Amino acid sequence: YFPAPVGYMAGGMAGHGGTGEQTHAVLPTVTPAIALSLALVSAAPAVVEHSRTPWPRDRSTSLAQLRRGWQLQRHVHLLRLTAHVTLCAFMFGWHVHEKASLMVTVPLALALALDNSNLAGEEGRRRFVFHAGEYVFVATVANYAVSPLLFQPREWPIKALVQVIGVVVTRGTLRVAAGACGRKNGKGPLEPVVILGRLQWAYLALGLPALEWYATWGHAWVFGAGRFEFLPLMLTSTYCAAGVLFAYVVQAA
């Protein structure tokens, strides 16, 4: 039995920073070399696919050239490749922190911004809606994964408002952008757009509030104060890991 170093921060929140390599008695021991190999192997198919895509050879980066469909799609594809590769590193890296998920959400957001300027036809609209739902889901999970850093009771309203406002504004903005693409000549009513699938919606709208209720109030009510203090944070990490795994599987497929 090798206890991890435990530190108690302001307010009594327990945490530990033990990141050293250990040999497990039951679980297989994962070394940095194994983690690096898994990350490279998981990212390789997307990198090979991007390198084999027959992009035109025009290297101009002027605004007029960027607005050409093929130029824009090349940049969008590269941004999404960056997001996928960093997600592979996040999934299989030897030691990562929840904040590293920003390396995934930032390229996805930039890709959406570029893609929105070149929405054309029903195919472009469907592509934008799919990636918009992907971004909303990953960004929400990533934001919630770092929310335990605000653990003081007086910080809970701030944490809750940031989560809710972020989801509502992001989802609403992307729905308007996708709906406007469906109008002819920019006129007519906005078409209804479904950004999130049923599983994604259930994960965010049902699972996250239930988890937050348990971590904030339910755990003390079920087990009493001071017992199994690790459980709320463990459940949060596990649930968010399942969400990131779902996003990785969708991208890899």
Image: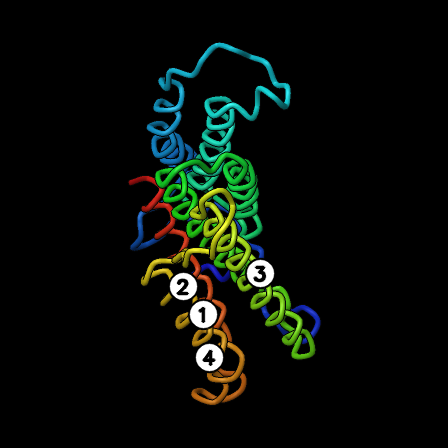
- Residue 9 position in % (x across, y down): 67, 68
Specify the amino acid type for callout 2.
Tyr
- Residue 73 position in % (x across, y down): 46, 28
Q: Are marks 3 and 4 in contact (CB under 8 Å)?
A: no
Q: Are marks 2 and 4 in contact (CB under 8 Å)?
A: no
> Which residue is at 69% across, 78% downward?
154
Closer mark to the observer between disc 3 and disc 4? 3
> Which residue is at 64% across, 19% downward?
62
Between discs 1 and 4, the one toward the N terminus: 1
Specify the amino acid type for callout 1.
Leu
The residue carrying pointer 3 sits among few (fewer than 14), some (14 to 19) or many (20 or more) residues within 10 Å by Cα, namely few
Q: Secondary structure at mark 3?
A: helix
Cα separation, mark 2 vs mark 3, equals: 23 Å
Q: Quadrant of residue 40?
A: top left
Q: Are marks 2 and 1 in contact (CB under 8 Å)?
A: yes
Cα separation, mark 2 vs mark 1, equals: 9 Å
Closer mark to the observer between disc 2 and disc 1? 1
Q: Secondary structure at mark 1?
A: helix
Closer mark to the observer between disc 2 and disc 3? 3
**Which residue corresponds to mark 4?**
214
- Residue 136 position in % (x across, y down): 48, 54
Cα separation, mark 2 vs mark 4, equals: 13 Å
Per the rendering, the mark at residue 239 is 2
Specify the amino acid type for callout 3.
Val
**Which residue corresponds to mark 1?**
208
Between discs 2 and 4, the one toward the N terminus: 4
Per the rendering, the mark at residue 169 is 3
Q: Quadrant of residue 114?
A: top right
Closer mark to the observer between disc 1 and disc 4? 1
> Which residue is at 41% across, 59% downward?
192
